Amino acid sequence: MTQIDLNCDLGESFGAYQIGMDEEILPFVSSANIACGFHAGDPGVMRKTVKLALENGVAIGAHPGLPDLQGFGRRNMNVSTQEAYDMVVYQFGALQAFVRAEGGVVRHLKPHGALYNMAAVNPQLSEAIAEAVYRVDPQCILFGLSGSELVRAGKRIGLQTAHEVFADRTYQKDGTLTPRNQPGALVVDDDQAIQQVIRMVQEGKVRSQQGDVISIEADTVCIHGDGPHALQFARRIRDSFERIGISIRAVGHK
């Protein structure tokens, strides 16, 4: 039987600002990527989100980003490899402390936003992130864009890796995501998004914005929890997978 992980970026509220529907989304996903305070999140939000994930039996991952609250970590920054390493170790350690305090384990790490996209194409940055993960916990699974430099760096250093695909994003012919500031970056039609992701999982193919059909590996599918139809979409994509015999399991779980 085909199985796939459904992951969602969570814990992205901060102070008085409420973002996403964490409690409502968690029953429909198998992995949660929890913000670690740089691009979003704060200590209270981290603690609450960790508790919710454990209560729902969802695998917990660290979701470190660039130190850019105002830009939500989605703006590129000219960071050195040493800075990237330090940022990841710092944020990973912060979430790990909350998870251990609640009796859980951090199963994976997935960089956020601009850090994720920069690492997808930058071998040196990817190596710094992979080394940070390996030094903190060599058992941690590193999530990266399918076919990216980050996945390759993780494999080279000896980490288990997971190729990630996106239900609600369009792709370029080189396998990268269409930047959010370009037209057509988001797939806004739920039916189209579901058809795209089922094809990626079953056939290992996706059609790029340029019209090319490209090969892609899919170990985990990202859905976003902060859109207006996020809960409806999470329910629909899970139902669609189960209806065609694709089971939902966290990466590394049998």
Image (cartoon, rainbow, N blue to C red):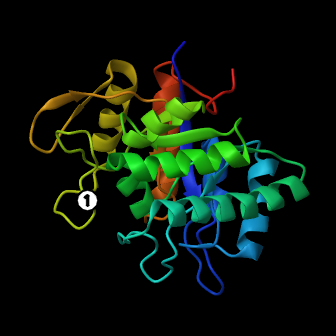
The residue sitting at 24% across, 57% down in the picture is: 185
Q: In the rendered structure, which amino acid carries the disc numbered 1?
A: Pro
For the C terminus, which image quadrant? top right
35 relative to 166 in the view: left or right:
right
179 relative to 95 in the view: left or right:
left
Please give the count of numbered marks on the rendered protein: 1
The residue sitting at 47% across, 59% down in the picture is: 81
16 relative to 56 in the view: left or right:
left
**As displayed, is residue 227 above or below residue 155?**
below
For the N terminus, which image quadrant? top right
Let me know if residue 108 appears in the view: no
7 relative to 46 in the view: left or right:
left
Circle 1 packing at 10 Å, graded few (<14), some (14-19), many (20+), is: some
The residue sitting at 51% across, 59% down in the picture is: 225
Q: Nearer the viewer, residue 33 or 84?
A: 84
Q: Nearer the viewer, residue 192 or 66?
A: 66
Q: Position of residue 137 (x, y in %)?
A: 72, 43
Let me know if residue 80 appears in the view: yes
**As displayed, is residue 12 above or below residue 124?**
below
**Would you name the residue on which mark 1 appears?**
179
Q: Which residue lies furthest to the bottom in this view?
A: 16
Q: Quadrant of residue 141?
A: top right
Q: Position of residue 79 (x, y in %)?
A: 43, 68
**As displayed, is residue 151 above or below residue 234?**
above
Q: What element carries label 1?
A: loop
Q: Where is residue 245 in the image (x, y as percent from the top left)?
A: 51, 18
